[in-house]
Amino acid sequence: MAWHKLCDRSDLPEGGGKEFVIGGQIVALFLVEGEPQAVDGMCAHQGGPIAQGALQDKCVTCPWHGWQYDVKTGCNLLTKKKMLNVFTTDWRGDELWIEL
Ligand code: FES
């Protein structure tokens, strides 16, 4: 595990997700109640782009086949099983860092 710079405060997503690739890891970043939430960017079903999914409260819906996840826990809403990794983030001034 190591810390990597994810983005600047000015790069944060607004009203949806944003995808980043950090060291080969695809990360989907969302803002939930103003707080960054970073999860696996590839859907556990067939690799759909999680960052492009619609976000409602803390729930994202994969745009390919509609699987839904809680972006705070990484759990699938239907099965309640954790299916996406959730990454720790940390503000360092105006930079958002992520532990991968
Ligand atoms: S790839 Fe996400 S629901 Fe199928």
Image (spheres, rainbow, N blue to C red):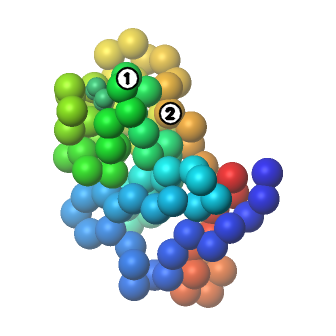
Q: In this view, does 67 lie to the left or right of 36?
A: left
For the residues labelled 1 and 2, the Cα–Cα distance comes to 10 Å
Residue located at (57% from left, 50% from top): 25
Camera-side residue: 31 or 65? 65
Provide the secondary structure element on which disc 1 rests.
loop
Whether residue 5 is situated above or below residue 66 in the rendered picture: below
Camera-side residue: 38 or 20? 20
Residue located at (42% from left, 52% from top): 28
Q: Where is residue 53 in the image (x, y as percent from the top left)?
A: 24, 45
Q: Is residue 71 in view from this perspective? A: yes
Q: What residue type is labelled 1?
A: His
Q: Which tag, 1 or 2, sits closer to the chain's start?
A: 1
Q: In this view, does 22 lie to the left or right of 2?
A: left
Q: How many other residues sit within 10 Å of disc 1, few (<14), some (14-19) or many (≥20)?
A: few
Whether residue 65 is situated above or below residue 95 in the rendered picture: above
Q: Position of residue 72 (x, y in %)?
A: 47, 43
Q: In this view, does 21 lie to the left or right of 93?
A: left
Whether residue 5 is situated above or below residue 72 in the rendered picture: below
Q: Does the residue labelled 1 lie within 8 Å of ligand 1?
A: yes
Residue 45 numbered mark, or none: 1
Pair 1/2: label in front: 1
The image quadrant where one finds ligand 1 is top left
Q: How many other residues sit within 10 Å of disc 2, few (<14), some (14-19) or many (≥20)?
A: many
**Which residue lies under the disc numbered 2?**
84
